Amino acid sequence: MTDDIDFNWESKLEIKSKDTPQKVIETFPEDKLDRAKYAKFLTKYLKSSSYDESTSTHLNYVLNLNSEWGAGKSYFLRRWADDLKLKHPVVYIDAWKQDYSEDPLMTVISSLINQLKDQAPKSTEAFKPPKKLIGLLKAAAPAIARGITKRYLGIDPVKIMESDDEIDQGDPIVDGEDKPIDMGIAASKIVGHLISEHDAKSKAIESLKVTVGQWVKSVVNNGKNSPAFIFIDELDRCRPSYAVEMLETIKHIFDIQGVIFVVATDTEQLQHAVKAIYGEGFDARTYLARFFDSRFSLKSPNFDNLLEVHCQKQKLSKEHFDKLDILVWPENEDSQLTLDNITAVLNSFGLSTRAGIQITVKVIAIISNLDSSTKLDILMLTTLLCIREKDEGLYEEIINLKFTKKNGDKVVSLDDFLIDRFSIENKKLKIEFDKNQVHSTSRFRFIRFEIGIYNADFSFYIKNVFAPIFDNQSGRSALTFIGLAGGSSRTSNVEDNILERLSTIYHEVSIPEERFYGECANKILELLAVTSKINSAKPQFYKDLVELASAIDWIDEES
């Protein structure tokens, strides 16, 4: 059987119910992060690394798939496992959903039985425990208190003892109520108990390995290829004791030939779990390394693609804003342009994947709950949320108009400080320009610029739009900037100055074209900010919004 797998994730994946095939229980969208190539690479890597050519045998292998929260581990594993299932025995275990169990061994064994059964021939005898394992259980039964075992394990060891040694594998062993005992489950529960008993440990483990190997072999004999892949997901989200016990189970019990484990974790978070068990001074990194043969770090995607996956982008369209009767500036028609601008701000402040997603979701939540007729500068709101995330002390100084910084005797302006500290010089904003957005056009009609999308500098925005609102040292204020301090004539003067600068740029035909359009975009950005009076509200308005957003407690959900 050919083993070529077409890892094509360009369309969505629907996971359907085993019992009701027409029922879709989970849907995964198309791969917008270009992750299929990693699945293809890892499949080849794991198969070659776990194969001994000298003996022509498949060995055991354990891979740690490491990536931070929000990078898409679960999505990656589910799509990878679904493709592999076409050619290989595959088991997917969500450890977090099953950590209510006190026994990680039971979690793995029950998942193996349930999922491999579906992939094996319908008439298979493989999932009936071998006589060797039944004999082991019988030998162990007298050492296990009957009442405790029945109460906590749900298995009556006496009934196993009383079973006929020559019983045919097809005949059921029944309990006191003549109900068949599921010997697969019985085996896993009692073997789990035996493992803690020194005398029986070795025999129990070897017997269990043989049984699991038979289960895998039955699937291979059903037209699949070796090796088998067992995916353990969400381990870092489990309670610490359960996570550590699961790793111990995989390492010491399931080192079975032809079985590859892929354990997906945020390794940093998992280290915290280990330290919760062994103490803060414990070398958790070295401890975890002994469980894995290798580690593959799934690179965190950039925000350009990630936010669209995690956020409700449609709520950033001008159409949606119009329905809410609010003005969100810059007034881009396309929601993607607005999302691109949020992305530019997030990238400017070097936020983690987790923080970037959280801030974007909060921005969307704030916008969706604004009062009608409200005007909001989405760049300003996002910038303030980013500053608060990076440095809450700095945020408090800025939002309360108390920013003061000096370099020796020289006063450092807010814009220079932010641009230098966060390296935001080269980040671009997308501004959709329509002459109808400019209220005063008497002089503007002589400046022939095309309607379209311009790439303005975020640093220009910080210097000419953001800083004048909050810089207590510069002598500028929000009122001065938008021209309200001197009445409507002041607004007109500010606008005229910008228009005159635009006219000057237009006539400076000797300057390079790239700089020409860049300067135009920057001045158009400023012009639109002034004419829309978008930031006529006092800083208190944005302070209230940020505090409301920051009060939202984020519940971790992997993607």
Image: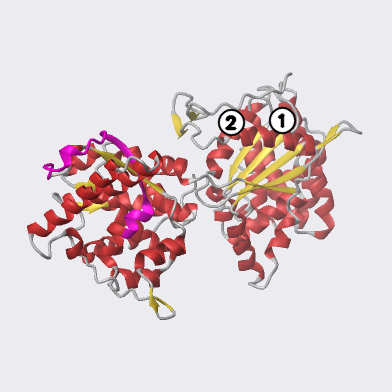
Q: Is residue 32 located in the magenta-colored stretch of the structure?
A: no
Q: Is residue 462 located in the magenta-colored stretch of the structure?
A: yes
Whole-number angstrom distance, CA of label 2 to CA of label 1: 35 Å
Amino acid bearing label 2: Asp
- Name the residue nearer the viewer: 480 or 397: 480
Query: In the rendered image of this protein, does residue 69 appear above or below residue 468?
Result: above
The segment highlighted magenta reads 440-463
Mark 2 highlights which residue? Answer: 82
Residue 79, x across and y down, in percent? 56, 34
Q: Quadrant of residue 9?
A: top right
Q: Characterize the local packing of mark 1: few (<14), some (14-19) or many (20 or more) Cα atoms within 10 angstroms.
A: few
Amino acid bearing label 1: Asp
Residue 155, x across and y down, in percent? 65, 48
Residue 461 appears in view: yes
Mark 1 highlights which residue? Answer: 171
Residue 317 appears in view: no
Query: In the rendered image of this protein, does residue 493 appear above or below residue 297?
Result: below
